[in-house]
C-alpha cells in the first residue's frame, strides 16, 4: 500500500476485506473515533464478530413521537422550590418557629427524615423556619404563582407545566448523578438519560453530534462526566462536550494547533486511502459505498459544528432576547442560543449545566440564600425565557421539549446564622415546556411548608420516562442483555401533563 501517512498503521486486504479489528482499534480514540464508532455501531459492524444475536435499536421510534429534540437545563446545587416555582406563604406565617411548634410537626417522623437526621445531613430540618426570601405573584393567563426571581420565565408560564411534587433518595449531591441516571453513584455506573436517547434514535443530522453538552460539567464529587456518560451502552452514545466558541467548538481538538492540523491531515489522507482500496475491492457493493460516504461526512462535522455555534449572524433582537450581551446573563444566554441553533439543525439532546463549581454547585445555598439567588437567578432567567419565546416564535417549541431540573430542593428551616437552607430531597419542583406538554398547568403538590411531596409524587425517573415517551421510546424495549434494570429505573410517564 502506498501513500499511508507516517505514524499510522498499514491496513492490508485479505480475501476482499480489511483487518477490521485493527482498523476499529486505531480509529477508536478522540472525537473522530466517537463519530465513527457511533456509525459502525448503528450499522451493526462494530459487533459483527459477536455471538450474541441480540440487535441494538433500529434508530426508529417505538411509537409516534410528539417531540424531536430535548434541551435539558440542569441547575447544579439544588434550587429552592419555595423561592422559585412553589411559593409557600406559610413560611412567613410560621417564621421563627420550629417545625415542631407548627401544625406540621409530623413531617419529621417519617423513616426517610429520621434516617437523614441520623446521617448528619438535614439538621436544618429541626431549625427555625426561614421566611420566603423573595416576593411572588401570579403570572400569565393561567395565574400560576412563581417568585419574582424569575420574571422572564414568568412571562412564559402559559407554555409551561410545573411539577411540584418531585422526590429523590440521596440527601447529598450524589443526587446530581442520580437525576441524570436514576441510580445512586455508589451503585455503579449507569447510562445517562441523554445516552439512552442517543442509543434509541437515529440521527436527524449526520453532520452534527446528536448528544451535546454545554457548560461546565458536574464536579467529580457528584458524578462528573458520568452524568452525560453512556456506561455499558458504549462511549459512542455519550454526550459530546462542546464549547460555544466557533473558533474551537470541540475543546479537546485545538484547531489552531500545528500538531492537530498535521494529525487531521493524516486522518484525511488515511480515509482517502481506505476509500481507494474499498472502491477497488467493493466497487459493486452499494452498502460499502454508502458507508464510505458516511465516514467522510463524519469528518465534515468539523465544518458544520463551528457554523452551528456561531451566533454572529443572529439579529440584535434575538441577542437581546437571550441577554447575550448582558454582563450577568451573557454566558448562559449564549449557551441557550447555541442550543436553539443546534436543535434547529437536528441535534437530538442538548444538555446545559449551570452553576458548576467543581463541587456542590452555586445553587447550594447553605448561607446567604438571598444575595446568592439575586445573582444566579439573573444569570439564567432571561436566557431561559428567551429560549422559550424564540422556540415558540420559530415554530420549534411544539417539537422541542425544554426541561428545567435540579437535584433536590431546600429545607423550610434556616441553616446557619446567615439565612441559608439545607439539602431537601423530600419535595421539590421541576418543569417542562413544549414537545407535546400542556402549558399553563401545575401538577402535584407539597404540603403547606413545602416539605413533603404529598400529591402525585414523582421520583426522578418519572421525568426520564416522560421524556422518552414524548420522543416515541419505550425504555423496556431498549434494555441490553445482561444489564437488567430495576422497575424504578424505568419510571412512570406523567400522563397528566401531556397534551
Image (spheres, rainbow, N blue to C red):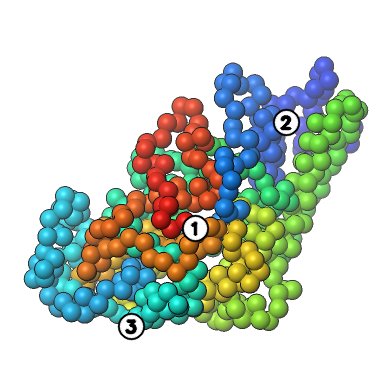
Image vertical order of residue 74 relative to residue 266, above or below: below
Residue pictured at 67% horizontal, 30% vertical: 44
| CB under 8 Å between discs 3 and 1 | no
Question: Of helix, strand and loop, which one carries label 3?
Answer: loop
Residue 11 percent across, percent down from the top left:
79, 28
Q: Do the residues labelled 1 and 2 touch (CB within 8 Å)?
A: no
Q: Is residue 291 left or right of residue 130?
A: right
Mark 2, residue position: 23
Against 337, residue 200 (above or below) is above
User: First in sequence: mark 2 or mark 3?
Assistant: 2
Instruction: Say few, some or many: other residues with alpha carbon within 10 Å of mark 2 (under 14 / 14 to 19 / 20 or more).
Output: some
Q: Nearer the viewer, mark 1 or mark 2?
A: 1
For label 1, the crowd category at 10 Å Cα-Cα, with few meaning under 14, some 14 to 19 and many 20 or more, is: few
Q: Tell us which disc is closer to us: 3 or 1.
A: 1
Residue at 36% in and 75% down: 145
Between 269 and 277, the one nearer to me in the picture = 277
Which is more N-terminal, label 2 or label 1? 2
Q: Disc 2 versus disc 3: distance between alpha carbons?
A: 62 Å
Mark on residue 135? 3
Q: Dot 1 lies on which element?
A: loop
Quarter location, residue 135: bottom left
In this rendering, does residue 185 appear at all? no
Residue 326 visible here: yes
Tell me if 466 is positioned left or right of 263 in this view.
left
Quarter placement of the N terminus: top right
Residue hosting label 1: 499
Residue 130 spot, x, y in % from top left = 22, 75
| Rendering coords of residue 314 (x, y %) | 71, 74
Residue found 45% across the figure and 69% down from its top: 440
Q: Which residue shows up at 46% across the image and 27% down it?
A: 482
Report which quarter residue 105 is drawn in. Answer: bottom left
Question: Closest to the observer: 331 or 153?
Answer: 153
Amino acid at each position: 500500500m502506498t501513500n499511508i501517512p507516517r505514524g499510522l498503521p498499514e491496513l492490508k486486504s485479505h480475501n476482499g476485506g480489511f483487518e477490521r479489528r485493527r482498523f476499529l482499534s486505531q480509529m477508536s480514540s478522540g472525537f473522530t473515533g466517537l463519530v465513527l464508532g457511533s456509525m459502525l455501531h448503528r450499522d451493526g459492524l462494530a459487533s459483527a464478530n459477536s455471538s450474541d444475536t441480540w440487535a441494538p435499536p433500529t434508530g426508529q421510534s417505538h411509537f409516534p413521537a410528539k417531540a424531536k429534540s430535548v434541551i435539558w437545563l440542569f441547575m447544579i446545587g439544588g434550587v429552592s422550590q419555595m423561592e422559585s416555582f412553589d411559593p409557600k406563604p406559610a413560611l412567613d406565617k410560621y417564621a421563627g418557629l420550629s417545625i415542631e411548634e407548627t401544625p406540621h410537626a409530623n413531617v419529621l417522623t417519617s423513616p426517610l427524615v429520621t434516617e437523614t437526621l441520623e446521617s448528619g445531613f438535614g439538621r436544618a430540618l429541626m431549625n427555625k423556619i426561614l421566611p420566603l426570601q423573595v416576593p411572588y405573584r401570579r403570572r400569565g393567563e393561567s395565574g400560576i404563582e412563581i417568585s419574582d426571581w424569575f420574571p422572564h420565565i414568568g412571562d412564559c408560564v402559559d407554555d409551561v407545566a410545573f411539577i411540584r411534587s418531585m422526590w429523590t433518595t440521596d440527601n447529598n449531591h450524589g443526587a446530581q448523578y442520580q437525576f441524570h441516571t436514576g441510580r445512586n453513584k455508589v451503585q455503579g455506573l449507569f447510562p445517562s438519560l441523554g445516552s439512552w436517547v442517543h442509543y434509541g434514535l437515529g440521527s436527524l443530522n449526520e453532520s452534527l453530534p446528536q448528544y451535546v453538552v454545554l457548560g461546565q460539567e458536574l464536579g467529580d464529587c457528584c458524578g462528573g462526566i458520568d452524568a452525560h456518560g453512556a456506561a455499558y451502552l458504549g462511549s459512542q452514545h455519550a454526550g459530546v462536550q462542546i464549547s460555544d466558541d466557533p473558533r474551537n467548538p470541540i475543546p479537546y481538538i485545538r484547531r489552531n494547533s500545528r500538531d492537530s492540523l498535521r494529525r487531521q491531515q493524516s486522518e484525511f489522507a488515511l480515509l482517502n486511502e481506505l476509500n481507494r482500496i474499498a472502491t477497488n475491492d467493493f466497487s459493486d457493493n452499494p452498502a460499502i459505498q454508502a458507508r464510505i460516504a458516511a465516514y467522510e461526512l463524519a469528518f465534515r462535522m468539523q465544518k458544520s459544528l463551528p457554523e452551528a455555534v456561531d451566533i454572529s449572524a443572529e439579529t440584535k433582537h434575538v441577542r437581546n432576547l437571550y441577554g447575550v450581551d448582558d454582563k450577568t446573563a451573557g454566558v448562559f444566554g449564549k449557551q441557550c442560543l447555541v442550543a436553539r441553533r443546534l436543535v434547529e439543525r437536528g441535534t437530538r439532546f442538548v444538555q446545559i449545566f449551570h452553576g458548576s463549581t467543581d463541587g456542590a454547585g452555586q445553587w447550594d445555598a447553605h448561607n446567604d440564600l438571598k444575595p446568592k439567588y439575586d445573582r444566579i437567578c439573573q444569570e439564567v432567567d432571561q436566557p431561559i425565557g428567551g429560549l422559550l419565546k424564540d422556540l415558540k416564535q420559530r415554530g420549534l417549541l411544539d417539537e422541542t421539549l425544554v426541561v428545567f431540573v435540579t437535584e433536590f430542593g431546600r429545607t423550610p428551616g434556616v441553616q446557619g446564622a446567615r439565612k441559608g437552607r439545607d439539602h431537601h430531597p423530600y419535595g421539590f419542583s421541576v418543569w417542562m415546556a413544549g414537545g407535546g406538554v400542556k402549558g399553563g398547568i401545575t401538577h402535584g403538590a407539597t404540603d403547606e411548608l413545602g416539605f413533603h411531596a404529598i400529591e402525585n409524587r414523582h421520583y426522578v425517573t418519572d421525568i426520564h420516562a416522560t421524556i422518552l415517551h414524548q420522543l416515541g421510546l419505550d425504555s423496556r424495549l431498549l434494555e441490553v442483555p445482561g444489564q437488567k434494570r430495576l422497575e424504578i429505573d424505568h419510571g412512570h410517564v406523567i400522563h397528566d401533563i401531556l397534551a
